[in-house]
Image (cartoon, grey):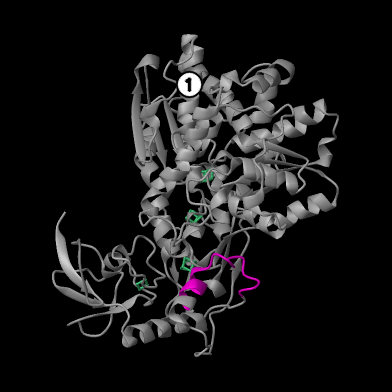
C-alpha cells in the first residue's frame, strides 16, 4: 500500500495514496460535513458543496469528497473561509427544503439537520421560490416527497449500484430539477422493485417507507386479535435503533416490547421459514426426481420476485411456487391456528414486522388473499416502541409465545442473511435424500457476503449458487434464461447481503453513528449476520424437518408437503405481464 505524507491543520500524517481529502481527513480523526458523499467519503457527483476545505496552493476551495490527496499536500479543514463557505452551502440547501421537522418522518435520523447543526446554520438567510412539492405515495412500499429532496443523488447511485436498474434519475433541468423515476413517473408506474435500498441512503425525509402504523392502531381500536410475527433479520438490527452497537442481538427485548405493546400473540416468522423449507425442499426434490424445470430458484424475497416479473418473466417456471415465509405464517394463522383456537379468522389481524419495504407491496398482491393485514419495517416497530414510552434498556428478555406455532429451528433463523435459505434447504434435502442428518450441520460454502457464491455439494451430486442484489444476480439469471445454468438450485435475495441489509432496517449513516468503528460501512452487514449465525448455533434443533410444531401441523392439518391443502395455502403464482399489472 503506497503512502503519502500530508498535513491537516498543520499536523503531519501518512495516509494511503488514492484517498480523497475527505477520506483521509476522516481516517486522521477530522470530521468534515458531507451530504452527497455516502460511501466512505468518495463521491461521484459532488453536488452539495458541503464538504469544502482549503488546500494550500489550490485555487479556491475544493470539494474534499472528490479531491485526491497527494504527496506534500497541506489541507486546512477549519479556516474561516472554508467554515463560512460550508455554512453558505447548507443555508442554500435549506432555502429550498420543506423545514417542517416536527412532522417529518425522518425526525431523529435526518442528516441534513445534523449537518446544519455542525456548520452552525441557524438563520434562514435565503428566502425565495421553492421547488414544487409532489408527493408520490401510490406505490405500496415507498413514498417520495420532492419538497424534502436536496438533490444529493445518493438514491440514484444506490439503485444503480445495488440493483443495476437505475429506476431513479434527475428529471427536468435547472431550478425545476427533481429526482424521480424516468419521465417523472410514480414508483407505481415504473419497474421499481420496492426494495427500499434508495430509502436506506436518503439523508432526508424525501424517500421513506409508507407507514402502516395507523392501520395497526385502528385494528387495536376495533378490538381485533392483533397477532404479530417478526422476521429473523429484525432481531439482528432493532437494538441499533436504541443506541446499541451494530451486531447486538435484540431478540428477547423485542419480544418483551411486543408483549407490552399489547399484541395478542407474538410469533416468530422462523416457524414459517421452517415451513418454507419443507415445501421448497420437497419441491426441489420433486423436480430433481421427476425431471422438472431446473434450476429451481427461491421465492422468499418479494423485491427479487418484483424484479423477476419485470425483467425475466421467461424464467417463471424456474421459480419456486412457495409464498414467502411471513405470507405462509399469515395463511396458517388465519386457517390452522384460528380453527384450533375456535377464533373466527375475521377477528384476527396479522402484522408482520419485516426488514423490508417490498413486503408491504407483496401483502397487497391479489394472489395473497389477505393472509397478512399490515407490514411494519424494523424502523416502524422502533417508532411504535418509542411512542409507547417503553424503555428499551430496561426491558427483560422474553420468549416468543409457544402456542401451536411457537417452535423454530436454527435453519429458520439464518433465512435473514444471504445463503441462509440455501443452507437451510440443504440441511433438509440432505436428510430427505440420504435418510440421515448432514453430520457437519453447517454448509460453509454458501456463507459469506460475496455477491455471488457457487458450490458443488458432492454428497448430493448437485451444484448450487447464491446471489443477492440484482446487479450481482444478472449474469446467473441470464444463464438460466439461456438454458446454460449448471445449477440445480439458486437462492436469490433482492437486497445486497440479504434481509439483514433490507430497505426497512435501521439507517447506517456514519455521521449519525459517531460511536461506531470507522470501518462501519464495510462491516455492518457481517455484524448483523453474526447475530443470526450465533442464534442458529445456540438452537437445539437446527434442521427445519425436526421442528415438532411443523411435524404436528402436517400430521393434524396439511397432510404432507405439496399436498392439496399445502398448495392452496402456502403456494402462489407469478405474473408474466407486469406492464398490465402496476406496482400498486
Ligand atoms: S426501491 Fe429499489 S428498485 Fe426502486 S428505486 Fe429504490 S433502490 Fe431502485
Ligand atoms: S431523494 Fe433523498 S437520496 Fe435522493 S436525491 Fe433526494 S435527498 Fe438525495
Ligand atoms: S432481500 Fe429481504 S429485505 Fe430485501 S427485498 Fe428481499 S425480502 Fe425484502
Ligand atoms: S459531500 Fe462533497 S460535494 Fe457533497
Taking the spot 74% from the left edge, 17% from the top edge, the residue there is 556
Residue 89: % across, % down: 41, 82
Image: magenta residue range: 101-116
Q: Is residue 332 left or right of residue 154?
A: right
User: Which image quarter is the N terminus in?
Assistant: bottom left
Q: Quadrant of residue 341?
A: top right
Q: Relative to the observer, which residue lies in front, 169 or 439?
A: 439
Q: Relative to the observer, which residue lies in front, 212 or 165?
A: 212
Q: Is residue 483 left or right of residue 256?
A: left
Taking the spot 85% from the left edge, 35% from the top edge, the residue there is 344
Residue 230 falls within the magenta-colored stretch:
no
| Residue 431 vertical position relative to residue 506 in the rendered view, above or below | above
Residue 325: % across, % down: 60, 34
Residue 230: % across, % down: 63, 41
Residue 581: % across, % down: 59, 49
- Give the SS element for disc 1: helix
| Residue 273 vertical position relative to residue 250 in the rendered view, above or below | above
Q: Main secondary structure of the magenta part?
A: loop
Taking the spot 36% from the left edge, 51% from the top edge, the residue there is 522
Q: Is residue 274 left or right of residue 79?
A: right
Q: Which residue was labeled with disc 1?
A: 427
Kindly tell me whether residue 469 is visible in this rendering.
no
| Residue 492 vertical position relative to residue 137 in the rendered view, above or below | above
Q: Is residue 276 left or right of residue 338?
A: left
Q: Relative to the observer, which residue lies in front, 520 or 174?
A: 520
Kindly tell me whether residue 490 is visible in this rendering.
yes
Q: Quadrant of residue 478?
A: top left
Amino acid at each position: 500500500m503506497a503512502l503519502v505524507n500530508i498535513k491537516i491543520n498543520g499536523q503531519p500524517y501518512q495516509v494511503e495514496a488514492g484517498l480523497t481529502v475527505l477520506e483521509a481527513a476522516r481516517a486522521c480523526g477530522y470530521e468534515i460535513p458531507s451530504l452527497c458523499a455516502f460511501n466512505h467519503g468518495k463521491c461521484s457527483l459532488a453536488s452539495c458543496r458541503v464538504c469544502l476545505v482549503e488546500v494550500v496552493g489550490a485555487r479556491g476551495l475544493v470539494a474534499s469528497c472528490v479531491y485526491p490527496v497527494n504527496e506534500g499536500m497541506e489541507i486546512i479543514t477549519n479556516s474561516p473561509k472554508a467554515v463560512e463557505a460550508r455554512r453558505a452551502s447548507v443555508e442554500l440547501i435549506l432555502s429550498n427544503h420543506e423545514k417542517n421537522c416536527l412532522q417529518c418522518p425522518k425526525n431523529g435520523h435526518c442528516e441534513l439537520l445534523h449537518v446544519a447543526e455542525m456548520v452552525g446554520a441557524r438563520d434562514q438567510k435565503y428566502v425565495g421560490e421553492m421547488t414544487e412539492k409532489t408527493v408520490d405515495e401510490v406505490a405500496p412500499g415507498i413514498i417520495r416527497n420532492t419538497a424534502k429532496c436536496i438533490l444529493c443523488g445518493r438514491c440514484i447511485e444506490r439503485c444503480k449500484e445495488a440493483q443495476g436498474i437505475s429506476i431513479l434519475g434527475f428529471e427536468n433541468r435547472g431550478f425545476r430539477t427533481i429526482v424521480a423515476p424516468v419521465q417523472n413517473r410514480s414508483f407505481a408506474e415504473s419497474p421499481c422493485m420496492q426494495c427500499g435500498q434508495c430509502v436506506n441512503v436518503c439523508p432526508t425525509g424525501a424517500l421513506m417507507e409508507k407507514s402502516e402504523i395507523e392501520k395497526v392502531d385502528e385494528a387495536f381500536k376495533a378490538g381485533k386479535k392483533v397477532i404479530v410475527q417478526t422476521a429473523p433479520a429484525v432481531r439482528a438490527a432493532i437494538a441499533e435503533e436504541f443506541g446499541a452497537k451494530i451486531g447486538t442481538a435484540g431478540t428477547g427485548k423485542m419480544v418483551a416490547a411486543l408483549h407490552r405493546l399489547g399484541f395478542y400473540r407474538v410469533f416468530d416468522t422462523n416457524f414459517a421459514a421452517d415451513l418454507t423449507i419443507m415445501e421448497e425442499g420437497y419441491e426441489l426434490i420433486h423436480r430433481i426426481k421427476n425431471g422438472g424445470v431446473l434450476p429451481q430458484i427461491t421465492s422468499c424475497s418479494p423485491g427479487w420476485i418484483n424484479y423477476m416479473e419485470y425483467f425475466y418473466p421467461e424464467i417463471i417456471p424456474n421459480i419456486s411456487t412457495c409464498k414467502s415465509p411471513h405470507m405462509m405464517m399469515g395463511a396458517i394463522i388465519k386457517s390452522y391456528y384460528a380453527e384450533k383456537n375456535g377464533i373466527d379468522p375475521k377477528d384476527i389481524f396479522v402484522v408482520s414486522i419485516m426488514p423490508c419495504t417490498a413486503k408491504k407491496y407483496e401483502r397487497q398482491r391479489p394472489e395473497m388473499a389477505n393472509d397478512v393485514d399490515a407490514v411494519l419495517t424494523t424502523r416502524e416497530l422502533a417508532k411504535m416502541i418509542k411512542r409507547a414510552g417503553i424503555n428499551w434498556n430496561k426491558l427483560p428478555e422474553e420468549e416468543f409465545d409457544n402456542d401451536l406455532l411457537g417452535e423454530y429451528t436454527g435453519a429458520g433463523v439464518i433465512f435473514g442473511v444471504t445463503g441462509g435459505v440455501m443452507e437451510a434447504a440443504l440441511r433438509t434435502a440432505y436428510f430427505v435424500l440420504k435418510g440421515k442428518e448432514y453430520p457437519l450441520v453447517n454448509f460453509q460454502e454458501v456463507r459469506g457476503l460475496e455477491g455471488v457464491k457457487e458450490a458443488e455439494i458432492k454428497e448430493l451430486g448437485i451444484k448450487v449458487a447464491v446471489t443477492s442484489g440484482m446487479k450481482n444476480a444478472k449474469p446467473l439469471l441470464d444463464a438460466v434464461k439461456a438454458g446454460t445454468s449448471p445449477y440445480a438450485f439458486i437462492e436469490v435475495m433482492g437486497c445486497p447481503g440479504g434481509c439483514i441489509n433490507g430497505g426497512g432496517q435501521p439507517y447506517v449513516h456514519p455521521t449519525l453513528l459517531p460511536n461506531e468503528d470507522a470501518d462501519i460501512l464495510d462491516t455492518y452487514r457481517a455484524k448483523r449476520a453474526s447475530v443470526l449465525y450465533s442464534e442458529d448455533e445456540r438452537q437445539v434443533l437446527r434442521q427445519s424437518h425436526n421442528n415438532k410444531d411443523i411435524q404436528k401441523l402436517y400430521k393434524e392439518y396439511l397432510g404432507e408437503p405439496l399436498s392439496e391443502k399445502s398448495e392452496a395455502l402456502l403456494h402462489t403464482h407469478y405474473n408474466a405481464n407486469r406492464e398490465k399489472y402496476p406496482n400498486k
